[in-house]
Image (cartoon, grey):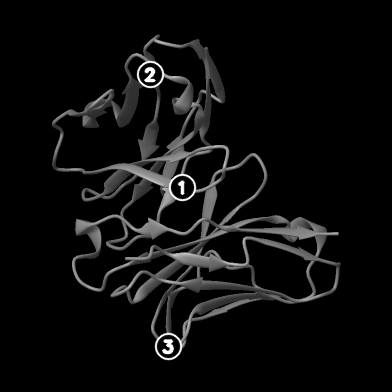
Amino acid sequence: NAGVMQNPRHLVRRRGQEARLRCSPMKGHSHVYWYRQLPEEGLKFMVYLQKENIIDESGMPKERFSAEFPKEGPSILRIQQVVRGDSAAYFCASSPPAGLMNTEAFFGQGTRLTVV
Amino acid sequence: AQKVTQAQTEISVVEKEDVTLDCVYETRDTTYYLFWYKQPPSGELVFLIRRNSFDEQNEISGRYSWNFQKSTSSFNFTITASQVVDSAVYFCALSAEGYQKVTFGTGTKLQVIP
């Protein structure tokens, strides 16, 4: 029973390039959450998605960032024209569809993005 | 608005000592959930506990125990007889949205010295 899978684990991008981070939720989970952890800080909520729907994107920066969770395939967090300030660890979590608060969200191991 | 405060940035203890990590939260919601996560040096997040606002019973799991007090809005975490493997950053977190949108504290870095 594989956990939440994120890839790549480490990603290096030059300023101005695009970064694509992937998250495959646990089997049976249809809810995905993305969080960002800046160096020496706690995690900050970015976006909550269900299959083909964005439910809450209140934590997403207004520009350059987008997220999707298609009917088939992993959830993608996309950062366009990356800047040094985007360097962070990006965590994905997933949870099952029913009784969301009867269980914890399971986190992936994170993708560490470095912008050079 | 929700807020989680972990006033202790870093703590160092000698192995086998007990240590308590403090967590104070703010929320206007009457129904909410509190969490503790561990982040070891390898970077992953390890779930430790979830507690809902209606359950003020303290919990013990092996060397770990949690003290939830609504009167002081605190959810403190104690490690008894600490071990080197306990060295990590510990995050307290809060959710009141009915789903897993979680507000994290800034974390407490615990170093257990052999």
Q: Residue at x 52, y 12 (%)?
A: B114
Name the chain under label 2.
B
Q: CA distance from mark 2 to mark 3?
A: 43 Å
Circle 3 marks a residue in which chain?
A
Name which residue lies at 23% across and 32% down.
Answer: B70
Taking depth in this image into account, of B63 and B69 the one nearest to the observer is B63
Looking at numbered disc 3 in the image, what kind of residue is underneath it? Glu
Question: What label does residue B75 carry, if any?
Answer: none
Q: Which residue is mark 1?
A: B45
Look at the picture and state if B7 lies above or below A53: above
The residue that disc 3 covers is A52
Label 1 residue SS? loop
Location of residue A99 with respect to B36 vertically, above or below: below
Q: Position of residue A97 (x, y in %)?
A: 25, 73
In three-dimensional space, the C-alpha distance between marks 1 and 2, rounded to whole angstroms, equals 20 Å
Q: Position of residue B23 (x, y in %)?
A: 39, 30
Mark 1 or 2: the one toward you: 1
Residue B43, by quadrant, is top right
What's the amino acid at mark 1? Answer: Leu
| Three-letter amino acid code at the position of disc 2 | Thr
Quarter holding the C terminus of chain A is bottom right
Q: Secondary structure at mark 3?
A: loop
**Residue A28 occupies quadrant:** bottom left
**Image height of B12 relative to A111, above or below:** above
Disc 2 target residue: B20
Q: CA distance from mark 1 to mark 3?
A: 26 Å
Q: Residues within 10 Å of mark 3 (few under 14, many from 20)?
A: few
Q: Is residue A102 above or below residue B36?
A: below
Image point (76%, 56%), residue name: A85
